[in-house]
Image: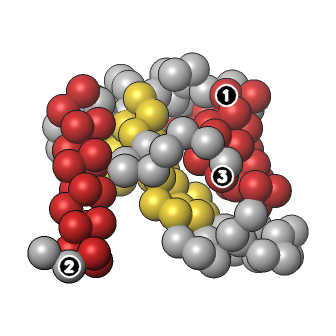
Amino acid sequence: MNAQKRKAVSQERRRNRVRRVVRGTAERPRLTVFRSSKHIYVQLIDDDQGKTLVAASTASPELKGKVNYGGNIKAAEAVGDLVAQKAKSAGFSKICFDRGHYRYHGRIKALADAARKGGLDF
């Protein structure tokens, strides 16, 4: 098994480990995070219906002029604030945080802290 395949398998195992515990419902949706090198994306998902309820990212029109580069902590904090505002306006205050296969530090931690500061409870 080459290194790239081994890394993908490890990421899938970590993702599944987190997803066994975290499940989104209509009352408490799952806040899932995807991180690329240039952007960060978040979604509030109701797993019972399989629907995305709220989405935000550094590529969204609300943050286009505010964030110069989407791959840093400052951008992650802006996305956390934006998703908190959108979730509050949609009527959600309690969520489950799904970090996926990413470690809880850096951009992921900054996003979660900003969402908490914005009024989300998880």
The mark found on residue 116 in the picture is: 1
Q: Secondary structure at mark 2?
A: loop
Residue 98 x %, y %: 40, 40
> What type is the residue that disc 3 sits on?
Arg
Q: Nearer the viewer, residue 27 or 2?
A: 2
Q: Position of residue 55 (x, y in %)?
A: 50, 56
Q: Which mark is residue 107?
A: 3
Inspect this view and state whether residue 105 appears: yes
Is disc 3 surrounded by few (<14), some (14 to 19) or many (20+) residues within 10 Å?
many
Farthest left residue in view: 1
Residue that badge 2 annotates: 2
Spatial separation of the CA atoms under disc 3 and disc 1: 14 Å
Residue placed at 59% from the left, 75% from the top? 37
Q: Earlier in the sequence, mark 2 or mark 1?
A: 2
Q: Residue at x 25, y 56 (%)?
A: 10
Asked if the residue at tag 1 contacts the one at tag 3, i.e. Cβ–Cβ closer than 8 Å, the answer is no
Q: Please give the name of the residue rendered at 53% of the width and 30% of the height, measured from the top-left corner.
A: 91
Q: Secondary structure at mark 1?
A: helix
Asked whether 115 or 15 is in front, the reply is 15
